[in-house]
Amino acid sequence: MKNEMEIWLDAISCNEVVARVAVAAFVAHLNPTLEEISDIKTAVSEAVTNSIIHGYGNTFGYRKRCETKEERSKIHPGRVNLSCKLSRGILYIDVEDWGKGIEDVDKAMEPLYTTLPEYDRSGMGFAFMEAFMDDLQVISMPGKGTLVRMQKKLTNGPWISGEE
Amino acid sequence: MENFQIIENCLMVKLPEEIDHYQAGYICQEADRYLLREEVCHIVFDFEDTTFMDSSGIGIIMGRYKKVSQIGGRVYAINVGKQISRILRLSGMNRLVEVLENEK
């Protein structure tokens, strides 16, 4: 059984929840475990948050929940593409942005490394994606954007393998 | 909804259902406002309502830990569920934060 989903999100912080809930709903029919759902939601949240706050520089939401019109106008325009595919019990997630990109991907992936400590970022985003998913690839070009590709094998009901 | 309460020298922070970057800013800002009060030196994060947390939550804890540890305070976590507990362990936060076991 194969299934695909693609969502375009404006690069604003309130879409982090939209992204992770959408992916959780996308895999819900496979009856995944609570732990798997929570792993996937965390990984998606990390990737999409990175695109929004690092890729496009929209730290919006941070200390600005009661935003004013003036603050809203400071948002850098940009979109995040979230593509999911389910094939043979494996969930593939791509999160892509066309923001500023990452100069040094290896450095960015080091636990506790962050370029935004003033926004209380922990630098654990990529570490969590790596820990919670089975595979993680980060492809980035400074000035062009970043693509994060993740995979996770799901423990699914017997009817899925019957259909393959 | 998150809320903040001072009990003796402790700041109790009741965390929201989901902690992400969008939620984190307000929590950090409010917690820091309370920490400026002289009598507060410890901070307790209550995860009772929390079912989701990403690395933004780790940022909240690390930032507050840096502040209270300077004045000899400690950081505690209560009502920690399974998912939150994994996140805390994975990020090494269990070395900075004392997780108090209770009914949950």
Image (tube, rainbow, N blue to C red):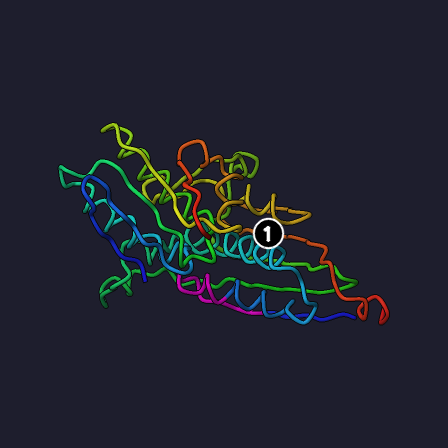
Q: Quadrant of residue B62?
A: top left
* Residue drawn at the location 33% of the way across and 57% of the way down: A60
Q: Quadrant of residue A61?
A: bottom left
Residue A119 x, y percent position in the rendering: 33, 45
* Residue A32, above or below B47: below
> Would you say B95 lies left or right of A8 here?
left
Q: Residue at x 68, y 48 (%)?
A: A134
Q: Position of residue A32 (x, y in %)?
A: 67, 62
From the image, tell me which residue sits under label 1: A148
Tell me what residue is drawn at x 56 percent, y 56 percent.
Answer: A38
A112 lies left or right of A44: left
Please state which of residues B87 and A101 is positioned toward the viewer in this rendering: B87
Q: Is residue B28 left or right of residue A3?
A: left
The chain letter for the residue carrying disc 1 is A
Q: Which residues are magenta?
A: A7-18
Residue located farthest toward the front when viewing the structure as drawn: B103
Q: Is residue B59 above or below residue A77?
A: above
Q: Is residue A10 magenta?
A: yes
Q: Position of residue A47 (x, y in %)?
A: 53, 53
Is B58 left or right of B7, judged from the image as shown? right
